[in-house]
Amino acid sequence: MFEAKASKANLTDAEWLMLVEKHLIKPIIREWLAQESKKRLTFQQLKDAFLLRWTPTETEKNQAVYKLSMLKLAPGDDFKTHKEAFEKLMRISQPGHPHQTRVMPFLGTLYPSLSLDLTREPTVYNDYHQLVTRVCFLHSQQKGKAQVAAADAN
């Protein structure tokens, strides 16, 4: 229920504050909250100032969309780094959207042979986290095959 409310930005003040305290652990954000909470009279003013300060601008969103279009995973690349870069760009380009909206864009950042393997598995489209786990597994298999082939070639 909490995730559904959060995805629709329909949180009470107490829920919103709990979300901020729990998930926004960067020191710069904590410092900003400590300073701003002294200036703001009501929680709504603090919430509005927070959203104004930390919500990406249209230019930042457009740049993130462009970077997403250029982001591609190659067979020899590190999957974890690729996933983190993808999720960072998605948070900027589509703030507040649920994880399920990331399935198709994520598939677009993969190399063709991996995408082909995934399209043969219809269950992969049901859950973003399941997709990430499956891609990590298939990518590690293909990376291992490429390393063996390179060793055999030498």
Image (tube, rainbow, N blue to C red):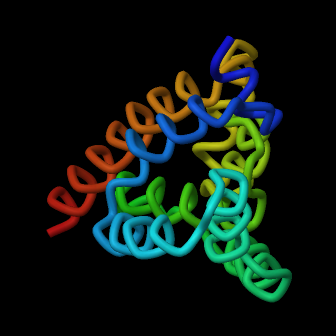
Q: In which quarter of the image is the C terminus?
A: bottom left
Q: Establish if 22 lies above or below 109.
A: above
Looking at the picture, tell me which residue is in the foreground, 20 or 33. 33
**Residue closer to the observer: 139 or 87:** 87
Q: Which residue is drawn at 60% across and 38% down?
A: 16
Corner quadrant of residue 90: bottom right
Q: Is residue 45 above or below residue 57?
A: above
Q: Position of residue 11 (x, y in %)?
A: 72, 31
Q: In this view, does 145 lie above or below 82?
A: above
In this rendering, would 46 be left or right of 84?
right
Horizontal side of residue 8 vs 111, given as left or right: right
Residue 77 visible to the viewer: no
**Residue at the (18%, 56%) spot, across then down:** 152
Residue in the image at 54% along x and 27% along y:
129
Q: Give the camera-side residue of 24 and 63.
A: 24
Q: As drawn, is 2 to the left or to the right of 33?
A: right
Looking at the picture, tell me which residue is in the foreground, 103 or 52. 52
Q: Position of residue 24 (x, y in %)?
A: 42, 53
Tell me residue 89's x, y (percent).
Answer: 62, 67
Residue drawn at (72%, 53%) of the image = 44
